[in-house]
Image (cartoon, grey):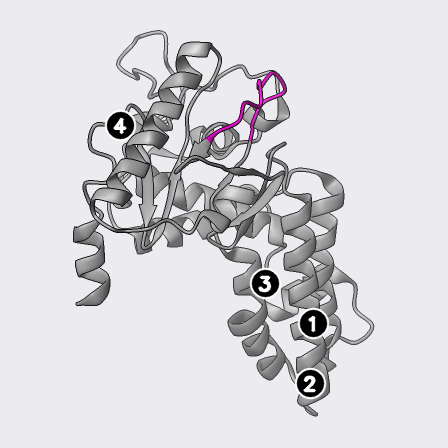
Amino acid sequence: MGPLLFIIFINDLDVGLAHKIFKFADDSKMMARVNSNKEINDLRMDLVKISDWTDRWQMDLNLDKCKVMHLGSHNARRIYKLNDVKVAEVKEEKDLGVIMTEDLKFHKQVSEVAKKCNQLLGLIYRTFISKRKDIIIRLYKSIVRPYMDYCIQAWRPHYIKDITVLERVQKRATRMIEECKGMDYLHRLEICKLTTLETRRLRADLLEVFKILKGKEGIDKDLLFQMIDTSDKMVTRGHSLKLYQKQIGTDVGKFSFSNRVVHEWNLLTEEMVQVNCVDAFKGRLDNYLKHVRGFK
């Protein structure tokens, strides 16, 4: 009952605030646009209200763990306080297992994930004498690959150097297999019935879009996507759940989840997007990526 009672106790933390608080267990985050003095003062007032709430309910904040990250090249980088104590400024912070940086790039996250996965591959190599395919692949899928799949829709890399760093992990894993000695990478993937990690990330993106549009994630689709009115006579191609592709100038926006998925999602067939079962969509998506798009 402890976690449930705690959630009930802090449920009114954001009542009366100008900005929404994102809460997960005992971790809370607030995001605000600060393009003017009024918006800066509104954020500061919200922090005062949070401080008052903690005093009233004797729920002290751990101020050493409270941080502020300034986003945007034109951010004024003002000072913010909680309980009259200046909130420390950071350029990077790990948030629920993902390293966020103020430039919203994920080089550090990719580096840390690759390092962890290579350590695990080294442990597997030293621990298991037999390097048969069934053993190594099972260990790779259950111990190593989940680190590269975790929350990948949030930090999917788009720089070639980051993509290469992660792909090397899978290349190393397949080279360990006895049956794959002397083969090139694509042949090893075929023998092991694996896809490249980039194809796997594309699959994860499309699967997440399907879940959001079908209401299976509890996320308001209108916050992420803009649907195209396919009843318009000018729209003659594609399926009935097409998304609008925004024109964005920055890489951060261009390669964000809600924008990068639009082109690939709009290429899917009507038969694929009209299913309601996640497993059915997975099966059709795998067939589409392999036989129609020819992705490895």
Residue 24 position within the rendered picture, expressed as x and y whole percent measured from the top left: 33, 50
> Label 2 vs label 3: CA separation?
17 Å
- As measured in the structure, the alpha-carbon distance from the residue carrying label 1 to the one carrying label 3 is 21 Å
Q: Mark 3, mark 4: which one is toward the viewer?
A: 4
- Judging by the rendered image, the residue that carries numbered circle 3 is 194
Question: In the depicted view, which residue is nearer to us: 103 or 136?
Answer: 103
Q: Amino acid at mark 4?
A: Leu
Please identify the quarter of the rendering in which residue 236 is found: top left
On the image, numbered disc 1 is attached to which residue? 119
Circle 2: is it few (<14), some (14-19), or many (20+) Cα within 10 Å?
Answer: some
12 drawn magenta:
no
Q: What's drawn in magenta, residue-wise?
A: 70-80
For disc 4, the marked residue is 17
Chain-order first, disc 3 or disc 4: 4
Q: CA distance from mark 4 to mark 1?
A: 45 Å
Mark 2 or mark 3: name the one nearer the start of the chain: 2
- Mark 1: secondary structure: helix
> Where residue 197 sits: x, y (%)?
61, 54
Q: Name the residue tied to disc 2.
A: 131
76 in magenta: yes
* Secondary structure beneath label 4: loop
> In this view, which residue lies farthest toward the front?
84
What is the three-letter code of the residue carrying label 3? Leu
